[in-house]
Image (cartoon, rainbow, N blue to C red):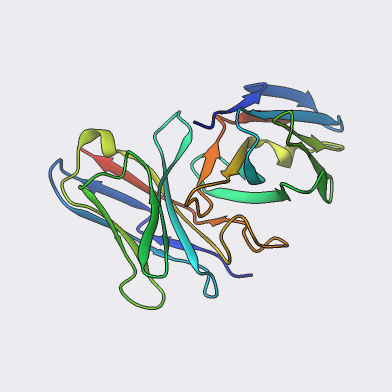
Amino acid sequence: KQEVTQIPAALSVPEGEDLVLNCSFTDSAIYNLQWFRQDPGKGLTSLLLIQSSQREQTSGRLNASLDKSSGRSTLYIAASQPGDSATYLCAVANAGGTSYGKLTFGQGTILTVHP
Amino acid sequence: EPEVTQTPSHQVTQMGQEVILRCVPISNHLYFYWYRQILGQKVEFLVSFYNNEISEKSEIFDDQFSVERPDGSNFTLKIRSTKLEDSAMYFCASSARAAGGSRGSYNEQFFGPGTRLTVL
């Protein structure tokens, strides 16, 4: 059974700092990995999708990497801003069987960027 | 930009009552999903739906739950007899393609804003 873990559980940084969020998964048989942002009481906003054959994806100040064989992904945020404060979720789409894209989520990292 | 919408945003019901949560997926998407998030816990998969039938469901999705695509735009989740433990945020998601066997970002899942279900 796939398990997804995110470290750290919470992170507080001053504005302008670069930071890294970590995600690990136990079963490397995945189709893809998605990073989401969740604001309090709100829905999930997709940030980046990495296919299993890819090593990294970039969008603006965000860069996500994937090492499928070791079951790890990182989300790098450059020059953090207070508006980046949110919970960041990692989710993997499990491969095999009749899976049509069921996502297994980590518990999230709560990021606070203070001015 | 196309987005997934959900109604209502908040539903309060009495234990044992039936509720229907509604979703309008992105119009050209073919795969639809329901997830839920109990307060303070992980987002959990409930069910996926393709070609007018359930393609996968979790252990949570028992006989009390059902899904339907009653027309070309809506996707609904019905809970027949709600329990206290059904209180959660319910998210609908859709994707153009399923994960696996496709290229590009077509299998990216897009989520709606959620319906907060409170069972009293």
Q: Is residue A95 above or below residue A76?
A: below
The image position of residue B105, as x and y in percent, is 69, 60
Q: Is residue B80 left or right of residue A114?
A: left
User: For the C terminus of chain A, which image quadrant?
Assistant: top right
The image position of residue A100, as x and y in percent, is 51, 55
Q: Is residue B9 left or right of residue A101?
A: left
Q: Residue furthest front?
A: A97
Q: Is residue B11 left or right of residue A17?
A: left
**Residue A36 appears in the picture as rendered:** no
Q: Is residue A55 left or right of residue B3?
A: right
Q: Is residue A44 above or below residue A20?
A: below
User: Residue A38 falls in which quadrant of the image?
Assistant: top right
Q: Is residue A14 above or below residue A86?
A: above
**Residue B57 appears in the picture as rendered:** yes
User: Residue B61 falls in which quadrant of the image?
Assistant: top left
Q: Is residue A8 above or below residue A36?
A: above
Q: Residue furthest bottom?
A: B72
User: Residue A93 falls in which quadrant of the image?
Assistant: top right
The image position of residue B76, as x and y in percent, is 33, 62
Q: Quick one: A14 or A49, which is closer to the camera? A: A49
Q: Identify the residue at horizontal 72%, vertical 28% (top origin).
A: A22
Q: Quick one: A91 or A12, which is closer to the camera? A: A91
Q: Identify the residue at horizontal 73%, vertical 62% (top origin).
A: B104
